[in-house]
């Protein structure tokens, strides 16, 4: 499984509540509509261990079944145009692409 993790902040003066409404409705629907996406999660980061300040306030995780489906969807030129519009709402994004090696659950 491939996971895209995006950590980011809001620009100065941005409205947190307005952003949360957009991110958990319209943008969440857009994320789930990307071809191949299995799951999309959104987090507000509350604390950072061993750090006095939070380097990032928000985090999104999006999952694809494999690297090919991720690359086909994420690097599609139409999707990149849509993404560039969404990126105008955030600041300092860090994009991490990881491949699952092991997954366990106590559920």
Image (cartoon, rainbow, N blue to C red):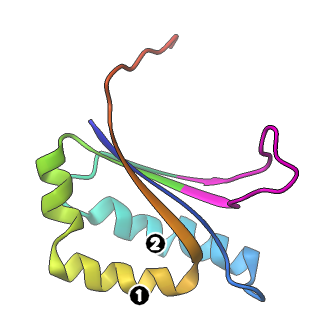
Choose the circle earlier in sequence order: 2 or 1.
2
Total labels: the figure holds 2
Residue at (36% x, 78% y) in the render: 83
Whether residue 43 is in magenta: the answer is yes
**Which residue is labeled 1 in the image?**
85
Image side of residue 32 versus residue 13, left or right: left
* Between marks 2 and 1 in the image, the one whose residue lies nearer the viewer: 1
Query: Percent from the top left, x then y, of residue 33?
Result: 28, 64
In x, y percent, where is residue 23? 55, 70
Q: Is residue 5 magenta?
A: no
Neighbours of disc 1 within 10 Å: few (<14), some (14-19), many (20+): few
Q: Residue at x 74, y 75 (%)?
A: 16
- Please tell me the numbered disc located at residue 99: none
Quarter of the image where one finds residue 59: bottom right
Which residue has dot 2 on it? 27
Residue range (magenta): 42-59
Q: Position of residue 5 (x, y in %)?
A: 45, 52
Q: Main secondary structure of the magenta part?
A: loop
Q: Quadrant of residue 55?
A: bottom right
Up-down relation of residue 66 to residue 13 (above or below): above
Mark 2 vs mark 1, CA separation in Å: 11 Å
Secondary element type, mark 2: helix
Q: Observer-nearest residue: 10 or 97?
A: 97
Q: 26 and 13: which one is in front?
A: 13
SS for dot 1:
helix
Q: Residues within 10 Å of mark 2 (few under 14, many from 20)?
A: some
Q: Residue at x 16, y 73 (%)?
A: 76
Among all residues in the image, which is located at the extreme top?
106
Q: Picture coordinates of residue 89 (x, y %)?
A: 56, 83
Which residue: 79% across, 38% down? Answer: 49
């Amino acid at each position: 499984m491939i996971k895209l993790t995006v950590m980011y902040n809001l620009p100065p003066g941005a409205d947190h509540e307005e952003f949360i409404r957009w991110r958990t409705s319209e943008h969440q629907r857009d994320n789930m509509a990307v071809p191949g996406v299995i799951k999309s999660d959104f987090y507000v980061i509350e604390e950072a261990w061993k750090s006095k300040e939070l380097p990032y306030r928000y985090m999104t995780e999006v999952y694809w079944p494999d690297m090919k489906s991720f690359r086909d969807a994420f690097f599609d030129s139409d999707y990149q145009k849509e993404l560039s519009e969404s990126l105008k709402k955030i600041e300092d994004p860090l994009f991490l692409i990881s491949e699952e090696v092991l997954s366990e659950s106590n559920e």
